[in-house]
Image (cartoon, grey):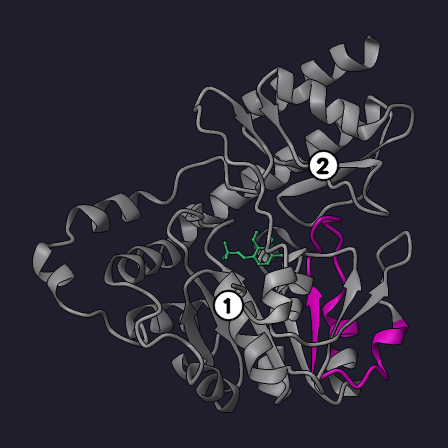
Amino acid sequence: MNYFRQNIEKAKGYEPGFQPRQTDVVKLNTNENPYPPSPAVTKVLAKITPEQLRRYPDPLGDQFRQAAAEVNGVQPDYIMCCNGGDELLSIAFRAFCDENRPVAYPVPTYSLYPVLANLLPCRAIEIPFDDEFNLPAKLIGTNAALTIICNPNAPSGTFISTAELASLADELTGILLIDEAYVDFAQANCANMVKDFDNVIILRSMSKGYSLAGLRFGYAIAPPTLIAGLMKLKDSYNVDTISVAVATAAIKDQQYFKQNVDKIKKSREELTEQLRALKFEVLKSSSNFVLAKSKNRNAGDIYDKLVQRNIYIRFFNLPGLDDKLRITIGTKEQNDILLSALKDILSE
Ligand SMILES: Cc1ncc(COP(=O)(O)O)c(C=O)c1O
């Protein structure tokens, strides 16, 4: 018997990056932060009591909303806590899209968007980026109910200016969701746009800049009317007591966060230069990863040879990406191991 809806039966589902079981590997494949979270996180974790776990959590995570509002210069009613940024994407698709209300986004980009469109289902209008990953003009005029711009984009790492996104928000007739999962590593962000536009939602993640990928915590910044609407679709208790306490401690420690992010940005510039010296074409990245195009060697082969050496990066066997490798910025030691393996492989 087939009990599933037809599109679910046919769907492949999202394929997450490989999570190796061993710990003695160089893992640069899923854009995690190579450094630990703030020491404030460890302190808060140690203080969680069984009594706190006996009770349901605060349904809105107000402690976090207050802290995130301060960091982003908005009021707490502009913030919604989510079980990872991915939950916000899932909520937004369900809130704005259906068979007659398509989603639009430039490609290549985060591969979860088409998966979510397919699960609803809704039509996905995919507009190709040019080679430099500029904002495609054709996004205006799609009449999509939801337009998503991943900024910085994954997997290119490229950045679209806040001015360009503001003028896009102005032109669109539907919602503009700016996926800022990687914005902690970028030169600017769009948080201020939520004060000027009634159709803008910003996605933030605690997984990257705050080193909390295992916690599953993200949040939306949006005008209060949109936040109130989005909240109707979330699980009643979508963020738990532990994660609210931990995420709050992490976002409050802006000094640690900035130091951590600065280290990664410095390593990103070094790794970019070193990869270019090995004759890779590397796009300027505003993220915690780089996309490197191999001019002379098959990217899939390089990937396989790195796996044999217990070094994991990301290879997408997809049009436009199958000659490229996405490499998460690691510690200096991890980056050096990768570079020395690449030198070996390229000289074979
Ligand atoms: C572009 C993009 N958006 C959103 C997310 C969601 O992040 P999380 O659910 O870990 O907060 C990710 C995760 O890798 C991502 O790459």
Left or right position of 329 against 301: left
Left or right position of 341 against 125: left
Determine which residue is flagged by label 2.
315
* Residue visible at 17% across and 46% down in the picture: 46
Foreground: 170 or 311? 311
Res. 3 mark: 1
Q: Nearer the viewer, mark 2 or mark 1?
A: 1
Q: Is residue 163 inside the magenta stretch?
A: yes
Q: Of label 2 and label 1, which has the lower sequence position?
A: 1
Q: Looking at this rendering, what residue extends furthest in the front direction?
A: 1
Classify the position of the C terminus by image quarter: top right
Helix, strand or loop at disc 2?
Answer: loop
* Residue visible at 50% across and 91% down in the picture: 225
Cα separation between marks 2 and 1? 34 Å
* Residue visible at 63% across and 22% down in the picture: 307
Ligand 1 lies in which image quarter? bottom right
Q: Is residue 168 inside the magenta stretch?
A: no
Q: Quadrant of residue 250?
A: bottom left
| Above or below for 126 versus 102 | above
Place of residue 310 in the rendered image (x, y in percent of width and height, measured from the top left): 57, 19
Q: Which residues are magenta?
A: 137-166
Question: For the residue marked with disc 1, what is the amino acid?
Answer: Tyr
Helix, strand or loop at disc 1?
Answer: loop
Question: For the residue marked with disc 2, what is the amino acid?
Answer: Phe
| Above or below for 138 versus 251 | below
